[in-house]
Image (cartoon, rainbow, N blue to C red):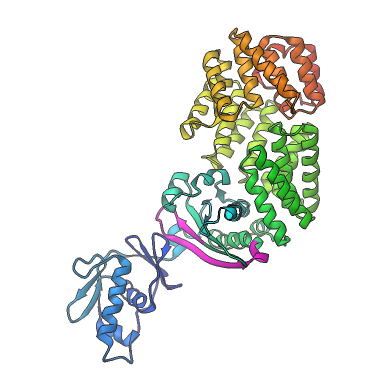
């Protein structure tokens, strides 16, 4: 007897999902190993829930030529099936034995087509999180590969029109944790979650990827990939296209453009690029120097590698902001790398974001910077870092409402990012919404009490409110956590000066002076300290020096509340004019 006609592709019961197209059984989205005969019996039973499937019917379909050993064979198969389901003959939840007749599936069954049921009639959903791929090789030196591939998939998916993609810095917090994809998706407020497992080998890599519905926990899509070392670079694009075919069944020109083929890259260059990106995220001096080294090596191996040039520009910008290199050196190299990336690929969103940062922070070409940010966000509307940068651009120009709206969009894309959460507080501080800045900073500290940048911004907001002693405590805590970063020392000095603790302010100022003999110290920070001390001429002299050196902090001088007492002077107004700030 033939099995009844199957109307649906997927049957779901309890925490299990039976996929009849691929002949797979999954538990909470995880594939179970089950031999063919037990799986075929399950397909017969689940296709007719509540009905008795006779042993004779099973024999005719699965063992038509076996008579003597049939009883043993079917009993063995059913026992293996029950073992996979965690079921028992004595207290059945799924399969009940009907004595001397057959079997009956007694659990409630939901039948559907995979994407129509899970995501709507057209198979589309609007939000996804790509959790950090698991490095199953257990080789710490290969973490760059699993992280790099995860981030690259995010970058590719984020360019699909209408799809909201969680940013890398948010999902990075899930790295190395035992995960329930459904719970993670609900926490992140996305409809789908992509999980993956990377296994490096001597001659290449294996990658297993699965897409899970965050509402139901069911598997929506999955694929296993095995690629040689020369093909690793192709994996992010292949995965993104596989998901795109499911989440946007009707391809559009915009989608085809978003998923356009990039590369091919030199395989060794791509490996160095992934290592460079991996170290960039660590942000320490040593890590940033490693990042530059790997990215330069990537470019040596592939001089036409636009992504590597863009990443190199970003690394140099971070070196400038961290005062690890003088701005003329760091930003000059950043600008050259960003321009080369655009020459190689003017449709690369990251290249436009990198160039926007250079034109904003170093060249002070405000119209060009805005144009570059807008192009980037047209190409990749899910780029949280670009939205963060654009929000900062708008705030620097005093376009407060636009700035706050943009940084909130960045936060929606990257809700667990401590950096963006702190950036929201910083922008509220620059907007002189000090109460809200304090509230936002404290919300970030609830997520991570030891994040020094947030203590720094909280100190700024408290200082502006006149709560100088509380501000000093915040700066001291931030200083202890960072080994006394220059901007924190300046903030501490300003707060001490504001509450009459002149000796403390002078001691912090001396500390910056001594440090400036050994390494670069941003002149803007000296101007901040002198502004706290009420020394108008010294404040303006150091601000002018910051202008001459193209100090990257200078973009904030138009809005920074710490300069309010010198804002009305002719020298300060002339300085703003020289910075090309629009009226």
Q: Quadrant of the C terminus?
A: top right
* Above or below for 555 versus 226: above
The residue at 41%/59% (across/down) is 218
* Above or below for 191 versus 287: below
Residue 433 visible in the snapshot: no
Q: Residue furthest top?
A: 500
Q: Quadrant of residue 524?
A: top right
Q: Which residues are magenta?
A: 209-232
Across the whole image, how many numbered discs are drawn on residues? 0
The residue at 80%/55% (across/down) is 303
Look at the image and say whether residue 222 sits in the magenta stretch: yes
What secondary structure is the stretch in magenta mostly built from? strand
The residue at 55%/34% (across/down) is 421
Residue 356 visible in the snapshot: yes
* Above or below for 109 versus 400: below
Q: Where in the figure is residue 454, as x and y percent of width and height? A: 55, 29
Look at the image and say whether residue 202 sits in the magenta stretch: no
Relative to 222, is 383 on the left or the right?
A: right
Relative to 196, is 88 on the left or the right?
A: left
């Amino acid at each position: 007897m033939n099995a009844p006609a199957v109307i649906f592709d997927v049957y779901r019961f309890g925490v299990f999902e039976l996929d009849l197209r691929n002949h797979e059984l999954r538990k909470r989205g995880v594939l179970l190993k089950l031999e063919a005969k037990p799986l075929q019996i399950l397909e017969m039973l689940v296709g007719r829930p509540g009905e008795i499937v006779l042993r004779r019917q099973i024999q005719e379909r699965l063992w038509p030529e076996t008579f003597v050993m049939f009883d043993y064979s079917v009993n063995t198969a059913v026992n293996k099936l029950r073992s996979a389901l965690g079921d028992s003959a004595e207290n059945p939840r799924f399969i009940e034995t009907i004595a001397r007749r057959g079997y009956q599936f007694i659990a409630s069954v939901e039948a559907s087509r995979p994407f129509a049921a899970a995501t709507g009639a057209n198979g589309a959903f609007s939000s996804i999180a790509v959790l950090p791929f698991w490095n199953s090789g257990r080789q710490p030196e290969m973490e760059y590969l699993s992280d790099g591939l995860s981030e690259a998939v995010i970058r590719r998916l984020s360019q699909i029109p209408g799809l909201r993609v969680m940013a890398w810095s948010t999902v990075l917090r899930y790295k190395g944790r035992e995960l329930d994809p459904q719970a993670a998706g609900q926490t992140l407020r996305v409809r789908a979650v992509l999980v993956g497992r990377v296994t490096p080998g001597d001659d290449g890599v294996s990658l297993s990827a699965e897409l899970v519905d965050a509402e139901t926990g069911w598997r929506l899509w999955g694929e296993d990939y095995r690629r040689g070392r020369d093909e690793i670079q192709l994996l992010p694009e292949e995965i993104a296209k596989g998901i795109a075919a499911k989440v946007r069944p009707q391809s559009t020109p915009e989608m085809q453009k978003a998923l356009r083929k990039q590369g091919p890259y030199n395989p060794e260059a791509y490996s160095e690029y992934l290592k460079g990106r991996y170290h960039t995220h660590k942000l320490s001096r040593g890590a940033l120097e490693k990042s530059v080294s790997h990215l330069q090596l990537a470019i040596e191996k592939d001089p036409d590698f636009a992504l590597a040039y863009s990443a190199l520009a970003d690394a140099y910008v971070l070196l400038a902001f961290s005062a690890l290199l003088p701005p003329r050196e760091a930003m000059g190299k950043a600008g050259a790398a960003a321009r080369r990336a655009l020459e190689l690929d003017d449709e690369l969103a990251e290249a436009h974001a990198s160039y926007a940062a250079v034109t904003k922070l170093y060249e002070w070409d405000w119209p060009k910077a805005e144009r570059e940010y807008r192009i980037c966000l047209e190409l990749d509307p899910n780029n949280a870092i670009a939205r963060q940068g654009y929000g900062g651009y708008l705030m620097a120009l005093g376009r407060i409402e636009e700035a706050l709206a943009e940084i909130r969009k960045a936060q929606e894309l990257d809700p667990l990012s401590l950096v963006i959460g702190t950036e929201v507080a910083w922008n509220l501080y620059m907007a002189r919404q000090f109460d809200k800045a304090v509230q936002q900073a404290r919300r970030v500290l609830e997520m991570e009490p030891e994040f020094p940048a947030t203590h720094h911004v909280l100190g700024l907001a408290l200082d502006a409110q006149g709560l100088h002693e509380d501000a000093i405590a915040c700066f001291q805590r931030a200083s202890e956590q960072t080994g006394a970063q220059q901007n924190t020392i300046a903030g501490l000095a300003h707060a001490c000066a504001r509450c009459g603790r002149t000796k403390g302010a002078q001691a912090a100022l001396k500390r910056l002076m001594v440090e400036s003999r050994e390494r670069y110290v941003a002149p803007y920070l000296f101007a901040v300290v002198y502004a706290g001390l009420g020394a108008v001429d010294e404040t303006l002299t150091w601000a002018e020096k910051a202008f001459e050196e193209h100090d990257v902090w200078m973009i904030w001088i138009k809005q920074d509340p710490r300069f309010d007492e010198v804002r009305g002077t002719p020298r300060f107004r002339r300085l703003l004019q020289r910075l090309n700030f629009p009226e």
